[in-house]
Amino acid sequence: MLIAGILWWASPDTPDRTTAPPPAAESGVITAAQIEKLGIVTATAAVASNIALGTVPATVTLPPEARVAVTAPFTGSVIRLFVVPGQAVRQGQALAIVRSREPVQYGAELARARARLDLAQATAARTGQLVREGIIAGARGDEAQSAVRQAQVDVAENARVLNQSGANASGEMTLRAPITGRLAMVNVQTGGPVDGMTAPFVVENTSAQMLDLQLPERMANSVFPGMVVEVAVAGGEPVRGSIISVSGTIDPVTRSLLAKARLDTSPALVSGKAVTALLKGTSPTPGTSIPAAAVTRMGDKDIVFVRTSKGFEQRAVTVASRTSDQAVLSAGLKPGEKVATSGISELKVILGGE
């Protein structure tokens, strides 16, 4: 029995009754000195009501009402030209002087209409006197008054045409810019003809801008009028705008659909320029916005390192959308919490065991 007791005590499977295992190191504990040495920077998570849907190619354009055609009221020829294509003009500025025979003809017709009016008024006065004396029937007086009204209409019509054309007695008229902007087209030259059916000048109002966006097929049901769109410009804040229309037809060749947006005016954007536009959609449940650098992958999960009272903790998150600068999370992090944006590799080694 004594030998059996000794063998039992010496057995390796017998639990150690005298020495307790050492306590494990507490997970996530990093001292302030370690944080400073590793150069870990944090950022505060914020509420993100606008979620970035992604970037799409776009072209800067002008709204349809921004283009105004300048036409000549009469057929004629340009005797002086004051502007060149692309020149900035102000409202009322002279663009060209046109000479035409029609204003002279209207001027002559106006003079004849005034003479007929004088005669009709004199005739109506005499006829009215005879009607009052009972010498002639009252119908004759009505006819005379009708002739006066017809003559007045002829005078007013010819005067209106001449006033609108701005032509002088020699038939010269000045074409002027109707708005302030830039000359997009100059379709005439000195000595060339003009008529009322063509536009010798087109002025663009450069204070208004739009975007033509090419949306991929996957965004067909995600983009709606009112959504926010942003265009990055060098050395300044992004230019913001909003979607105003989305085509309901997908192009069979490009597999994309066209959307149009109005933009705030920016001197860095000119009509015809190709840009990249960022689309932002409003989420019914606001997400959490953090710098994109704070999100990393461990295995098959997106994670962030959240600042705690003792250091950092590793936490899995759900990424709703991501751009080069910003990530929007739909789960895993609350606004106001701080996350590491640098020293991610070191934190993965310390906390994640990589």
Image: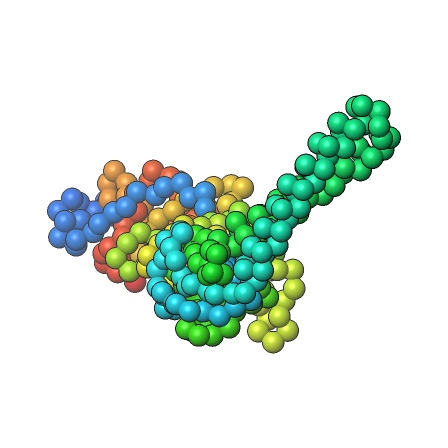
On the image, which quarter does residue 295 sit in? bottom left
**Tally of numbered tags:** 0
Determine which quarter of the picture holds residue 86: bottom left
Q: In this view, does 352 lie to the left or right of 189?
A: left
- Viewer-closest of 166 and 138: 138
Image coords of residue 22 (percent x, y): 23, 47
Residue 271: in sight, yes or no?
A: no
Please name the residue shown 65% across and 60% down the image: 248
Residue 338: quadrant of the picture: top left
Q: Is residue 109 visible?
A: yes
Looking at the image, which residue is at 22% across and 49% down?
Answer: 41
Of residue 91 and residue 21, the one placed in the foreground of this image is 91
What residue sits 79% from the left and 28% below the top? 130
In the picture, measured across the screen, residue 15 lies left or right of residue 277, that is left
- Residue 229, image x, y percentages: 45, 53
Q: Is residue 136 above or below residue 248?
A: above
